[in-house]
Amino acid sequence: MAVIAGFSLVGCAGSSGILPEEASLVQSPFDNYGDALLAFEEVSVQETTLAQLFNSGYDVTTFPNVRSLSYLDLIARFLPHDSITFADLDPALRACLEARLSCRGYQLTPSHVEQERVGSVMLDVFNFKRTEIKTGWQAEAIFVLHDDVVVYKLWSGTQRVSETHQRTNPLGPFQNLGGAFSGAVSSVVN
């Protein structure tokens, strides 16, 4: 009973210090979205070599979770369906893909995303109401190289991740008993 009273006081205070927190960070030389984008913009198409790419912060040998892309992977990415034709592609990208084995790409995804549960500890623990806040940034940089020279680059990302997810279960811990009950009944009947 004392434990429940203690949880009630913490829940009433609105403190979320004992609720789980989670962080997803891809280690990279970039502290924020702006740094990652600036380094990306400094890579010059038709000039930057693979060695220079390493020095820009996008070192594909040390950057975590780098995805190496063969020319077949690049074709699947840039020609995902029939409405985009080979003629629609950037000429340098097209020439690279035609070269086949001397064409390759790298996909790098620097990010820093934190997730925190906030709100009443009591409502959260007993599954009545759970609120999660996700903040941070995430990006994706793709570099296409033909004979170790960057011929095409592509950037996408979210400069400011700010999401709030809230789930409410009016019956709290009893909310999902219907599924468990029907599963137990069907196993007994069968």
Image (cartoon, rainbow, N blue to C red):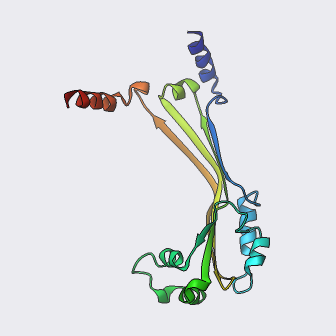
Measuring 57% from the left and 84% from the top, which residue is drawn there? 101
| Location of the C terminus (image quadrant) | top left
| Location of the N terminus (image quadrant) | top right
Q: Does residue 101 appear left or right of residue 60 in this picture?
A: left
What x and y, as percent, mark residue 16? 64, 30
Q: Nearer the viewer, residue 164 or 30?
A: 30
Q: Does residue 128 appear left or right of residue 17 in this picture?
A: left
Q: Does residue 21 appear left or right of residue 180 in this picture?
A: right
What x and y, as percent, mark residue 132? 57, 40
Residue 29: in sight, yes or no? yes
What x and y, as percent, mark residue 21? 63, 38
Q: Is residue 188 above or below residue 133?
A: above
Task: Determine the residue located farthest toward the front in the rendered image.
Answer: 101
> To which quarter of the image does residue 99 belong?
bottom right
Q: Nearer the viewer, residue 128 or 142?
A: 142
Q: Nearer the viewer, residue 52 or 113?
A: 52
What x and y, as percent, mark residue 24? 64, 49
Q: Does residue 33 appear left or right of residue 116 in this picture?
A: right
